[in-house]
Amino acid sequence: MDIKELREIASTTRQKQTKTRIRCCSAAGCLSSEGEAVKKNLETAIAEAGLGEKVEVCGVGCMKFCGRGPLVAVDDHDQLYEFVTPDQVGDIVKKLQESDAVAETGLISGDPHHPFYALQRNIALENSGNIDPESIDEYIALGGYEQMYKVIHEMTPGEVITEIDKSGLRGRGGGGYPTGLKWATVAKMPGQQKYVICNADEGDPGAFMDRSVLESDPHRILEGMAIAGYAVGANHGYIYVRAEYPLAIKRLQKAIQQARRYGLMGTQIFDSPIDFKVDIRVGAGAFVCGEETALIASVEGKRGNPRPRPPYPAQSGLWASPTLINNVETYANVVPIIREGGDWYASIGTEKSKGTKVFALTGKVENAGLIEVPMGTTVRQVVEEMGGGVPDGGKVKAVQTGGPSGGCIPGDKLDTPIEYDTLLALGTMMGSGGMIVMDESTNMVDVAQFYMDFCKSESCGKCIPCRAGTVQLYDLLTRFLEGEATQTDLAKLENLCYMVKETSLCGLGMSAPNPVISTLRYFRHEYEALLKV
Amino acid sequence: MTVATDRQTTPPSADHPSGDKRFKVLDATMKRNQFSQDALIEILHKAQEIFGYLEEDVLLYVARGLKLPLSRVFGVATFYHLFSLKPSGKHTCVVCLGTACYVKGAGDLLKMLDQEVHLKPGETTEDGQMSLVTARCIGACGIAPAVVYDGKVLGKQTEDSVLMAVQPWLGNS
Ligand SMILES: Cc1cc2nc3c(=O)[nH]c(=O)nc-3n(C[C@H](O)[C@H](O)[C@H](O)COP(=O)(O)O)c2cc1C
Ligand code: SF4
Ligand code: FES
Ligand code: FES
C-alpha cells in the first residue's frame, strides 16, 4: 500500500456514499436491546420499498445516547429515533417516503440537537456512531491511516513526541500522567526490542468508555498505537482487553486482519523500513490486571500480581523490555493531535487539563450514555444540562467518579469544573471516566461498603495491608449497616483507611479506602446516624 | 532480547488415554500457539470453552503440553475469576453488580433470586439446570441494571423480567 492507493480507497468509498444513510447503532448497548433485529428489518424494508438505490442502511458504532437505544438516525432528514423496536421499521420507511400515512406512529423522535449532543465536543469519539466499525474503507474515507503515513514519511520520532508533548495530553487511564513525557522516556531507553501496550481492561465498574471506542472505531486505536510504536521505537503492540467485551474483541480482530491485508500493519508499512504488528490478549476477569505491572504479568501468561515500581514498565516491562503502556482513550486522541497539531489540542480545555474527556454517565440520571466534553466543563453541566438530572425531579445527592479509586462529588459541589486537580482537591479523581449519579435514596455507607466488597474480592492478596485491610474495612462497614458500630469503630475505620492507603504495594490497595474516606468527608452524618446509642 | 518462551513444533503429548476427542481440539489450540508458555491464559480460555469448565485432567494436560509445572497452571486458573474449576449449570444467569447496576437495583434482583429460586451468587440448582453468577461490570451500564442470560445481554431488568426469563430453566428438567 502506498499513499496513492490509500487516497484512492478514500475517494472511491466517499463516492459510493451518496445515498441517504440510515445509521443504526450496532454497539453493545443497543445490540442488547434488539438493535440487530432493527437493522435487519430496516434493510429488508428498504429493499422491499424499492429504495435501495437511494437509501443505505449502515450499522455504526455507539451513537452515545445509550440509555435511549436502540437508536436509528436518518442523515439527510436530521431525524433521530429512540427506543426503536424491530416492528417499527415500517413506520421509519414510510416517514422516509414522506407519504401521508405517517400521522400516528409509535415512533419516538429524539432531538439530534439535544443538549446531550450539543454540548459535546467529539475528538476521541469523532468517528463513533458515524462509521461502520467493521469497514476499514469507511475509516480510510475519513482520512484514516493518513496520520500514520505522515509520521512515518514526514516526521522524526522526536517530532512526533514533541507534538504529543505540546498537546498537553495526560493519560486517560486514571492517573493522568503526561503522555508526551511517558513516550519520551520509552523512546530514550536503549534496547532493540520495545513494546507498546494498549490497556483495554477497563476495570472501573460502571464505565464503558473504552468499550465503546473499541467497538465503534477500532482502527483509530490501531493507528494510534502504530504512531506510538514509531515514536518510541517499538515494532510490536499488544491490546489487553477484558473477556467480558466479546464484541470489542471481535471487531479488533477484524480490524487487525483488514489492516494487515491492506499492508497497513506488518512489515515495511507504506514502503518504509518500519514494521509494526498488533496482537490481542484477552483478560480473564481480574480488576487488578488493569494495573500496569499486573497487566504485563498477565500478558506473559502469569497470575496478575503487581510488582513494586520502579523499575517502571518504561524501563523494564514486557519480557523485561522497555514498554509503553497507555489507555484506550489516550491512544484515541493521538490521531487528531497529529492531524491538527499539538497546539490545537492544547487550546481546548483548561490550563492544566487539556483537551476533552469521555465520560460514561449512568446511575440515577435521565439521559444515560457516553459523553465527550472539553475539560473545564462543570459537573453540573454534565449531570443536569446534558444528563437531564435525576428522573422525576429527584435531587442529585452525589456523583461518584473514578470508580473504586475515586470518591464522591457531593450535590452542593456540582459547579466544580472537571479537571484533574479540581477533582483531586474534592477527594475524588477523574479516573477513567465512569460518572455515576446517585439520588437522595442512596445510602452512602452502603455505597462505601459496596466498593469495599469489590476491592476485597479483587485484591490479589500479595500484600497484607490490602488483603487483610480491605476485609476489615468491609467488616467494619457491615457493623455500621447492621447498627452495631460504636464511636470506637468510627475512629478505627478512619485510621485503618489511612493505614491501608499508605502501606499497600499497588494502586488497588492504595486507593481502595478512597470511597470510604470521601463519603466520610461529605456524608459523615450518615455514618454517625448509624452508630449504636 | 531474551524471550522467556519455550517453543516446540511437535506436540509432546499423544492422544488422551480416555479417547475423549475434545483433547484433540485442545491439542490443536496449543499447537496454533506454538506451545508457547505465555499463551497459557488463551489456552485456558479455549479449554474452558471446549470442556465447560477446567477439570483437573484438563489442567494436567495443558501443563504437560506447555511444559509448565502443574502448580503454575493451577495458580493461573484459580487467580482469574472467569476460570471455573467446577462444572456450572446448563443455563447461566449473570447479574451485573457493577456500580451503575447496583445503584439501579441489581441488589434487589439478587434478593429476589434468593427468595424465589433459592440461589445465591456462585450456586447452581440441585438439578444442575441453572447457575447464578455475578459480574463486576459488563460495560452495558447505560442500560443498567443488566443481566446476561446464557450469553445474551438484556438491559433495564426488573425483578419480574428476571423471574420470567429464568422460569423456563427451572423445575421442568
Ligand atoms: C488497580 C488498578 C486498576 C487499573 N485499571 C486500569 C484500567 O482498567 N484501564 C486503564 O487504562 N488503566 C488502569 N489503571 C492504570 C494503569 O495502571 C496505567 O496507569 C494506565 O494504563 C496508563 O495509561 P495512561 O497513561 O494512558 O493513563 C489501573 C491502575 C490500578 C492501580
Ligand atoms: S495492594 Fe492489593 S492488589 Fe495491590 S499488590 Fe497488594 S494485595 Fe495485590
Ligand atoms: S450503544 Fe447504542 S447508543 Fe451507545
Ligand atoms: S455496572 Fe453493570 S453493566 Fe456496567
Image (cartoon, grey):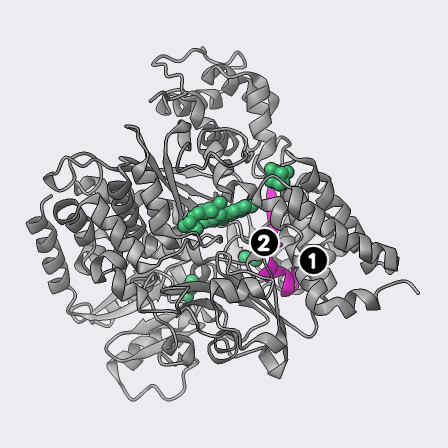
Task: Report if the beta carbon of the residue with label 1 is closer than 8 angstroms to ligand 2.
Answer: no
Task: Report if the beta carbon of the residue with label 2 is closer than 8 angstroms to ligand 1.
Answer: yes
* Viewer-proximal residue among A118 and B164: A118
Q: Chain of mark 2?
A: A
* Viewer-proximal residue among A467 and A115: A467
Q: Residue furthest left?
A: A4
Residue A400 in view, yes or no: no
The three-letter code of the residue at mark 1 reads: Val
- Locate residue B65 relative to residue A506 in the image: left or right: left
Q: Which residue is mark 1?
A: A516
Q: Do residues under tags 2 and 1 come within 8 Å of each other at their CB atoms?
A: no
Q: Of the numbered discs in the image, which one, if any, rests on residue A405?
A: 2
**Which secondary structure lies at badge 2?**
helix
The spot of residue A320 in percent (x, y) is: 41, 28
The spot of residue B109 in percent (x, y) is: 68, 59
Q: Quadrant of residue A98?
A: bottom left
Q: Quadrant of residue B99?
A: bottom right
In magenta, the rendered stretch is B91-107
The spot of residue A430 in percent (x, y) is: 50, 61
Seen in the picture, residue A60 relative to A239 is either above or below; the reply is below
- Locate residue A178 relative to residue A230 in the image: left or right: right
Q: Earlier in the sequence, mark 2 or mark 1?
A: 2
